[in-house]
Amino acid sequence: MRFISRIFNLNDPGWGRNGDKKDDANRPSNQPQGNQEGPPDLDEVWRDFNRRLSSLFGGKKNKLPRPPAGGGGRPRLPKGSPKIFLALLIAIVGLWMASGFIVVQEGQVAVVTRFGQYVRTLNPGLQWHWPTPIEASQTVNIAQLRTFEIGFRGSSRNKVLTESLMLTADESIVDVQFVVQYRLLQTGAPDYLFNTSDPDESVRQAVETAMREVVGKKPMDFVLYSGRTEVASEVQELAQSILNRYKTGIQISTVAIQNVQPPEQVLAAFDDAVKAGQDRERQINEGNAYANKVLPEAFGQVARMIQDAEGYKARVIGSAKGDAARFTSVLGEYLKSPDVMRDRLYLDTFENIMKQASKVLVDVDGGNNMLYLPLDHMTKSAGSSSSRSGSSESRHAAGSSAAAEDGSSESSSQSSSSNNRSDSGRSASGADAANSSLMNPYSPYSR
């Protein structure tokens, strides 16, 4: 560059003003010397340029012949001038081609355009493209995570109400503040540069539009409390679909809702409503807890009652089936010998009846004498003794059975003596016995 500045240094006062003293000595006497104050002579400029160019390439200083005094001749170029021009041209072209080398940093890409039209995208590293004005390159950072805020700036107190106030499905107004983070796609740099005039503002408008649409379809309580995550997810999906439709080459990474609250003008009344809602929820929870406590107990009681009913049902059905089977067996025996079975059933029936009776009257055939046995006291004493011990019960039962056998033997002897006295009394006593049989169909006197 120092040599080039020596050649093209136009600030040199000797340019074209006959700065060489030897040339002034060889100048004819009738030709005036160069005017140092006037404009430079073109011939002198050309000679100085060739002399300095020759000195640059190490050649001898060739002195150009001066034109004749009459000015009719034309200056001739020195020998080797085409080679000098060719070398100079090659150097200029080399410098121009070298200007096409660029270094693309990591996380960036270079978008190359040829005469303003997109051609290709260069990856990170040392790359080359045709220099200006044929091709140009623009570097785009695709790894950077870009962030912007909607509804506030910096902190939640610096609100932007034109962005944050939104209408819900139940015609209520909420103040929504959220943050959006996005980055470029790996192949989205050309779309980011050429498809939209202001891609960052397009992202802001798309996300704000999506948020207003989603909030407008949800009730206020859902947006304030339980549905923040769902609302943010739906907003991200809807905004991404809008940006894909515009072909912006942008991918939304996160939509984070920072704060959602009613407008400040109705915040106090809304807090009272929230407290009432919390009381309602508390009472509902208490009722659910009581229900969870009572219902299992009720279900347990129901299950126990059902099991008892099933057991009673099985017991009754089994007893009925047993009675039916016993009756069927007795019927078979009865059909084989009706008289014996009738007497047996009669005796069994009266045995069961007499077990519960406190007094017993025994009719004596052929007389008015009635034999009274203190069976009531005997049965009571037998019952009390049986409750005390099983052994005493067996002894009392044996004694009562012996007394009953003695009474029956005495009654049978008296009845046999009375039968020997009178046949008419026997018939009458037989009729009385028949009447005292309580009209039992199984009684032997009913035959």
Image (cartoon, rainbow, N blue to C red):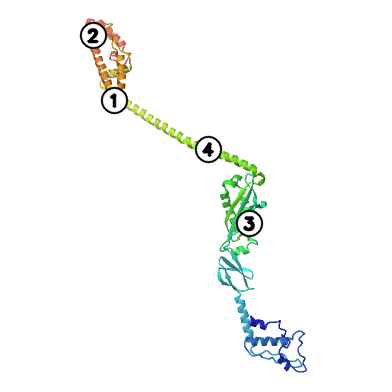
Q: Earlier in the sequence, mark 1 or mark 3?
A: 3
Q: Percent from the top left, x then y, of residue 33? A: 76, 90
- Amino acid, disc 3: Arg
Earlier-in-chain disc, 2 versus 3: 3
Disc 1 and disc 3: Cα gap in Å?
Answer: 98 Å
Q: CA distance from mark 1 to mark 2?
A: 39 Å
**Sooner in the amino-acid sequence: mark 1 or mark 2:** 1
Looking at the rendered structure, the secondary structure element under dot 1 is: helix
Per the rendering, the mark at residue 204 is: 3
Q: State the image quarter where residue 110 is shown.
A: bottom right
Residue that badge 1 annotates: 329
The residue mark sitting in front, 3 or 4, is 4
Dot 1 amino acid type: Ser
Cβ atoms under marks 2 and 4 closer than 8 Å = no
What's the residue type where badge 2 is placed? Gln
Label 3: state its secondary structure. helix
Mark 4 and mark 1 lie on one chain; the one further toward the N terminus is: 4
Q: Which residue is mark 4?
A: 286
Image coordinates of residue 6 in percent, x first then y, are: 66, 83
- Closer mark to the observer between disc 2 and disc 3: 3
Q: Are marks 1 and 2 in contact (CB under 8 Å)?
A: no
Q: Is residue 436 above or below residue 289?
A: above
Residue 414 is tagged as 2
Looking at the rendered structure, the secondary structure element under dot 2 is: helix
Q: Nearer the viewer, residue 43 or 250?
A: 43
